[in-house]
Amino acid sequence: MRSSTRRELIAGPAGKIECAVDEPEATPGGVARGVALIAHPHPLHGGTLDNKVAQTLARAFVELGYTAWRPNFRGVGASEGRHDEGRGEVDDLAAVLAHTEAKQPVLAGFSFGAAVQTNLAQRMTPERMVLVGLAVRHLEAMPVPADTIVIHGEQDTTVPLADVLDWARPLDLPVVVVPGADHFFHRRLVILRAIVQNSWQRKAEQP
């Protein structure tokens, strides 16, 4: 994503976990605002930490002053282990958080990664969550906090918008719909980043 992006290998439950880490360039007092953990789409369908939506989320949080961590799930890239249908992947994310020592991280994810993050959130209290293209058909998505940002493409044929609305309705959870966007937000990544950053700024301005 950036020339300053560094790669780290950390210990995980199935072996080493490869992570891309991006630090904010300038923060008050030189200290990052927090940690944003970003989960990529389905490993068996080409999902990696280099996915463009995952990179866009990382960029959004780096610009907001967070340190962004993007791990490769087990069996992807240099991460060891084998795909575990979402179960072990939750443990992988938890291991990354333990390594960062973040107490209340931001949990963000795209597609399969978004669904995995809803399961991780059952173990902790995140600062906030961002779920993009939530893959409710591929993994059970759990209830999330009321201030969670859910973003979906109007023309998503991989995860139909109706399915996400059916999931969000019992939770009284708003869904931000991007007109004309497909599952991968082709030519809509700038809009995606703006939605996240504007939501953060609006919350910061609330009394």
Image: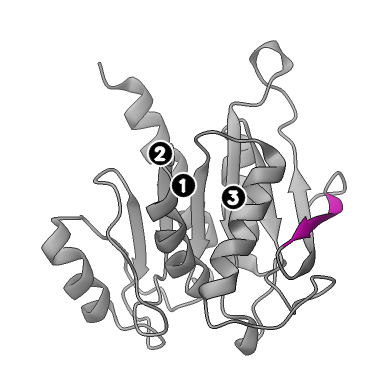
Depth-wise, is mark 2 or mark 3 nearer the camera?
A: 3
Q: Residue furthest top?
A: 29
Residues at marks 2 and 1, CA–CA distance in whole angstroms: 6 Å
Which of the 4 quarters of the picture holds residue 174? bottom left
Is 205 drawn above or below residue 12 in the view shown? above
Residue at (41%, 71%) from the top-left corner? 133
Depth-wise, is mark 3 or mark 1 nearer the camera?
A: 3
Question: Which residue lies under the disc numbered 2?
Answer: 198
Q: Is the residue under label 3 in contact with that under label 2 (CB below 8 Å)?
A: no
Residues at marks 3 and 1, CA–CA distance in whole angstroms: 18 Å
Disc sitting over residue 34 in the figure: none
Disc sitting over residue 37 in the figure: 3
At mark 2, the secondary structure is helix
Residues at marks 2 and 3, CA–CA distance in whole angstroms: 19 Å
Which amino acid type is marked by label 2?
Answer: Asn
**Residue 89 pos. (x, y %):** 59, 70
Which amino acid type is marked by label 1?
Answer: Ala
Question: Which residue lies under the disc numbered 1?
Answer: 194
**Residue 85 pos. (x, y %):** 53, 83
N-term mark: 2 or 3: 3
Magenta part of the protein: which range?
6-12
